[in-house]
Amino acid sequence: QVQLVESGGGLAQAGGSLRLSCAASGIVFSIKTMGWWREAPGKQRELVATITRGGSTNYGDSVKGRFTISGDNAKNTVDLQMNSLKPEDTAVYYCKLQPNAVYLGDYWGQGTQVTVSS
């Protein structure tokens, strides 16, 4: 059974930093991407960043230049370093795993709260 466990959320001041980690277990298939999405109250879930097994990255416009995603293929983990945090970064952050096999669907973590105070 696939399980994604997130850690590292919490409270930070504007201009500060936080680091999120996600560890996937129960993986018996090939992975296309892992990444982070976020959902703020009253807003749709949006892309934060993704990384392919080959190391290619993709960032949402609002976090470019401030957030950095990294992954460890051997451990099936993905981290998100968040710098220069803003109050508008406040959201629940979800880890997502996308298999190469489309029929499997995507897997999501339970979410971790990030709150940035001004």
Image (cartoon, helix red, strand yellow):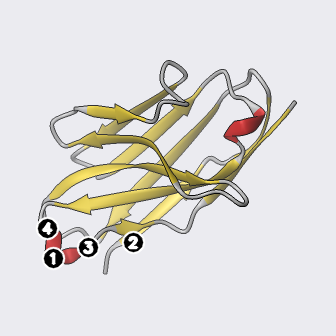
Q: Mark 4 and mark 3: span between their CA atoms?
A: 12 Å
Q: Amino acid at mark 4?
A: Phe
Q: Mark 2 and mark 3: span between their CA atoms?
A: 14 Å
Q: Is the Cβ of the residue at disc 1 closer than 8 Å to that at disc 3? A: yes
Q: State the residue at coordinates (15%, 36%).
A: 54
SS category of the residue bearing label 1? helix
Of badges 1 and 4, the one in the foreground is 1
Which label's residue is closer to the chain start, 4 or 3?
4
SS category of the residue bearing label 4? loop
Q: Mark 1 and mark 4: span between their CA atoms?
A: 12 Å
Q: Mark 1 and mark 3: span between their CA atoms?
A: 6 Å
> Which residue corresponds to mark 3?
105
In the rendered view of the protein, which quadrant contains the N terminus?
Answer: bottom left
Relative depth, front residue between 60 and 93: 60
Q: Is residue 10 left or right of residue 27?
A: right
> Which residue corresponds to mark 2?
3
Q: Is residue 3 left or right of residue 81?
A: left
Q: State the residue at coordinates (35%, 69%).
A: 107
Of badges 4 and 3, the one in the foreground is 3
Q: Which mark is residue 103?
A: 1
In terms of image quadrants, where is residue 31? bottom left
Q: Is the Cβ of the residue at disc 2 closer than 8 Å to that at disc 3? A: no
> Which residue corresponds to mark 4?
29
40 is higher (above) or lower (below) than 64: below
Q: State the residue at coordinates (23%, 68%).
A: 27
Relative depth, front residue between 68 and 41: 41
Q: Amino acid at mark 2?
A: Gln
Which label's residue is closer to the chain start, 1 or 2?
2
109 is higher (above) or lower (below) than 20: below
Q: Mark 1 and mark 2: span between their CA atoms?
A: 18 Å
Of badges 2 and 3, the one in the foreground is 3
